[in-house]
Amino acid sequence: MHPTPIVTLAAAEKLLKTLEEFLDKCEGLFAMIIDRGGTILSQTGRAPETADITVLAALAAGSFAATRELATRVGESEFNALYQQGSHFHILMNAADDDTMLVTIFGTQTTVGLVRFYAARTADQIAIQMQELRAGGDDAQPIFTEADLSAAPEVFDGTTLKP
Amino acid sequence: MAIINYANKEVQFKIVYYGPALCGKTTNLAYIHSQITESNKGELVSLATAADRTLFFDFLPLNAIVIRNFKTKFQLYTVPGQVIYNATRQLVLRSVDGIVFVADSQWDKMEENIESFRNLEENLARQGHSLDTIPYVIQHNKRDMPSIAPVHYIDFLLNDRAVRVPSVEACATTGEGVFETLNTVSRLLLVKFAREAEAAAIKSRSAAAASPMAGIAAGVRDHQSLR
């Protein structure tokens, strides 16, 4: 197993296909797969215009982690789904495995029951795909080496900083 | 944990700013946010109380240099410094790749610095990590305050190890030392990442060479090259 999880092109396509099929079936607006640290692994659909997806992922991961803590306080290992209801948009978060979760945004065009039903199935599929993803990558070549780093004096340089 | 995404050609890392209450963790992120170009930063999110104290975390996503066509992305988090929020600190530390420990340089904060540093070690241990394996930097913040301890004294308290980690003097309110800290920890992270990937590749090549099929495959390759 490679020390760092690698989302290869093949794995990315597979995850995306799973998400697209799920979104189509549940008639949701947007879905993403994130790790519990808040990093986005795959996404599809259209999120509400006000949503910054990166921030959404970080908040979802934080929110789910807090819920997990609540669960342990009442003797559960985890609440495996978390639903946030709004007036126009709703969010459903499902645990796929110990490190991955599925986040779905949907509106009034569908029902929470339908989304829940397909989300639970999709989360199981994602768990299997993530297991394959983590097991792979053994033959991956380093994407850069220490020598490449010595050519870059600063990680945050003139290209990222304001003049 | 860092993630390599070949589909987007990017590598993502998580850095957590840790330290006692009111040591300047959020101020570090606010200064960084103010200095990065719009296209290379996301929104700075602060989940704070009405009194502007961090309740859950602050979050700032950044893009940094491109290496061999791969974008490097860093997600910066802070933890709430107040003692009562330890459960939250544990959550934020999940999947951490690098740490900035922000120490308050004022004399009367030394005990809180030590307590927070020990708390960091304990919380990492709960997740099966330790400061021996996670790259980190100690920032001596608030060097502009009137009653401050000398740098070597704070290093003696927090950085007294066989191999000392880098420490940076800073004044987060003016921005002094803020980017030096960020550049130092992110470089440590990238170096560790590159070394691990190189070691994994070497291991993989050795394993392939040692496998019984490798000899046959090599023979087939040789045969084909001779034709």
Image (spheres, coloured by chain):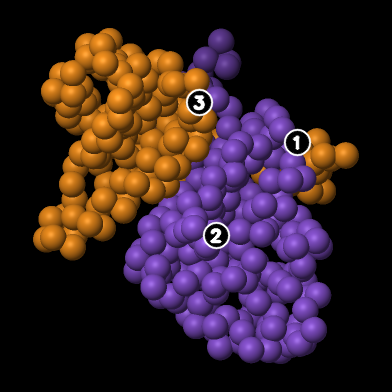
Chain colours: A orange, B purple
Judge whether A156 appears above or below A120 on screen: below
Q: Does the image show residue B58?
A: yes
- The disc at residue B19 is none
Q: Are marks 1 and 2 in contact (CB under 8 Å)?
A: no
Instruction: Name which of mark 1 and mark 2 comes first in the sequence.
Output: 1
Query: Three-letter amino acid code at disc 3?
Result: Thr
Judge whether B11 appears above or below A113 on screen: below
Label 3 Cα neighbours within 10 Å, binned few <14 / some 14-19 / many ≥20: few
Residue at 18% x, 63% y is A73
Q: Chain of mark 1?
A: B
Quickly name the residue at label 1: B37
* Lateral position of residue A50 relative to residue A74, left or right: right
Q: Label 1's element?
A: loop
Quickly name the residue at label 3: A50
Label 2 Cα neighbours within 10 Å, binned few <14 / some 14-19 / many ≥20: few
Q: Are marks 3 and 2 in contact (CB under 8 Å)?
A: no
Quickly name the residue at label 2: B52
Residues under labels 3 and 2: Cα distance? 24 Å
Q: Which one is in front in this view, the residue at disc 3 or the one at disc 2? A: 2
Looking at the image, which residue sits at the far right? A163
Q: Which one is in front in this view, the residue at disc 1 or the one at disc 2? A: 2
